[in-house]
Image: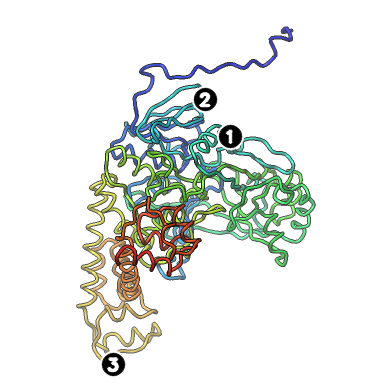
Amino acid sequence: MFPRETLKAKIIEVPRGTPKNMFPKYDVIVVGAGHAGCEAAHAAATMGSKVLLVTMNLQTIAQMSCNPAMGGVAKGQIVREIDALGGMSGIVSDKTMIQFRMLNRSKGPAMWSPRCQSDRFRFSEEWRWILEANPNIDFWQEMATGLIVEDGKAIGVKTSLGLEIKANAVVLTNGTFLNGLIHIGEKNFGGGRAGERASIGITADLINLGFEAGRMKTGTPPRVDKRSIDFSKMEEQLGDDQPEKFSYTDTKPLSKQRSCWITYTNQEVHDELKKGFDKSPMFNGRIRGLGPRYCPSVEDKINRFADKDRHQIFLEPEGWDTVEMYVNGFSTSLPEDIQYAAIRKIPGFENVKMFRPGYAIEYDYFPPTQLKQSLETKPVANLYFAGQINGTTGYEEAASQGLMAGINAHLKCHNKEPFILKRNEAYIGVLIDDLINKGTDEPYRMFTSRAEFRTLLRQDNADIRLTPKAHAIGLASQERMDKVLLKNHQADEIYTFLEKSKIDPQEANEFLEKNKSSLLKERSTLYNLLKRPEMNINLLKDLSNDLSNYLNTMHPASVEQAEIKVKYERYIEKELQMAEKMNRLEDLSINPEFDYHKLTSLSIEARNKLSHIKPSTLGQASRISGVSPADISVLMIFLGR
């Protein structure tokens, strides 16, 4: 037996300071290795910065903490944009997907949204290989507990071992780890993710530096054993017959796919869940943070939509070689025994075995109105925030912010102008503009409805929109740029061919009648026929051998571009005109230090909001919640416009 004295915990003072020469001075330190951190580190390093990636666990790089999927409505567009800019989320998704579906195919191309089921283990593994292959990235496994700030600038980070690591810029991508608190029924414990500890120290440091902080929450469902599921009681959901991919590079499309499955809750399930409502941290006040409105917990759905007698459940495989499955639609923080009893009432789950229960997690975030458009913070220079620390939800939203923060941290280190995307240029531009101008008090999720120029911001043309910009700053390769130039050139040639190719009524009318399209009375161009709603370019190939032979020499992506241009030309032109008008306001700069309280013609709310957010342009000011068109007119007069 050990003497009792030796069993007492001792407080050990951690010596401060870093041994000389242990670390070089880095250009950029990225804290956190989730989706935002990985993209930030990769972007800055690829552009030439020396980067240190600091994470509490090198075994969980790019972990898919929630569902094993990438993309979806609007989110798929973001992944395509990340890829077009030279980021890696699209390539990693292509290499590790197990199913692909293009959502909203029945709608116009502005709504088409790629989505894939991923192998969560290979996704993380692929990301680590990519980062380790970059010679400009170093790694350090430890908790970052604070910042080093001098003269209002971030110059490094402090760690739990008392080390001080210096850099010219710091990017924080802490995810749900900042003072994370996990809830399961009446139990709660610190953690940033199941089985992993929370990160402490940084929140207090930031508050001392003048930042405003808040709390948010998110949740995750139980994971179950595939071997205990009765799939005969469920609806099989197959992938697309001809699966596409996310990346514009030469990644390979899937040759085989895994199925997902659909089932539904019922009144018995709801009654079982209600037995635990009195112990739910959602309902008894123990959770203070707001959760994502568009991805509510199952108990929240039952409570809010009491008139519905069932809710859809998607059963999604976690990978190629595992029996673990994700129960999408059953996110919950109820006691584990309630979860187990309720889930066994769902058709197909009668004999289910759970791997682990669902839980809710609360974490700190920092209202994003404290950021510039570059994602650099206003209170502290050379400090960047990306991901859930900004109040967003979703891998895709986080990854896009990480990419932009990494780009801008690199540019700042090398005394270059920040890289900003406008609302008419990218969903990423919409996302960041919404965050910094409107803020958010609930987890922000991207939707196509948030983008006023969504006909311009399609998933098919992200490379045309963004690769030239990324190539100009040194992120997208010349090979990517050459592909865009070829795609554009071929699309223009196809468009011209359709305009010039004419067909007589006697050649076309039998075909048109067969396809329930109005007959021609005079000679027409293939361009005019393609404009008809019931026509598409594949049908026209059946009508015209010349067109068919010509298109066989072109890349399919170029053919798609030409067809969309023909069919949606008027809508595209209208949005371009609207974007041009909006961009005129973006050209009118405002001194960020301007004293709005001197302009008594402005409403009180406008004065307060403008003083808080400090917009850099009149366009940005016009999008701040609470600033009216009348207020913008006052500012225009003051600016002499």
Looking at the rendering, in which quadrant would you find the N terminus?
Answer: top right
Residues 328 and 297: in front is 297
Q: Is residue 293 visible?
A: yes
Kindly indicate the quadrant of the structure image that contains residue 541.
bottom left
Residue 272: give x, y in percent of width and height: 78, 54
Q: Which residue is mark 1?
A: 198
Residue at disc 1, secondary structure = loop
Which mark is in front, 2 or 3?
A: 2
Residues 200 and 7: in front is 200
Residue at disc 3, secondary structure = loop
Q: Is residue 316 left or right of residue 629?
A: right
Residue 601: give x, y in percent of width and height: 43, 66
Q: Is residue 549 left or right of residue 257?
A: left
Q: Amino acid at mark 3?
A: Lys
Inter-mark Cα distance, 1 to 3 = 73 Å
Residue 377: give x, y in percent of width and height: 42, 43
Q: Is residue 2 left or right of residue 251?
A: right
Looking at the rendering, in which quadrant would you find the C terminus?
Answer: bottom left
Q: Amino acid at mark 2?
A: Ser
Inter-mark Cα distance, 2 to 1 = 13 Å
**Residue 521: image tag:** 3
Residue 126: give x, y in percent of width and height: 42, 39
Q: Residue at x 43, y 30 (%)?
A: 148
Residues 285 and 334: in front is 285
**Residue 160: image tag:** 2
Compared to residue 199, the image places residue 397 above or below, namely below
Dot 2 and dot 1 residues touching (CB under 8 Å): no
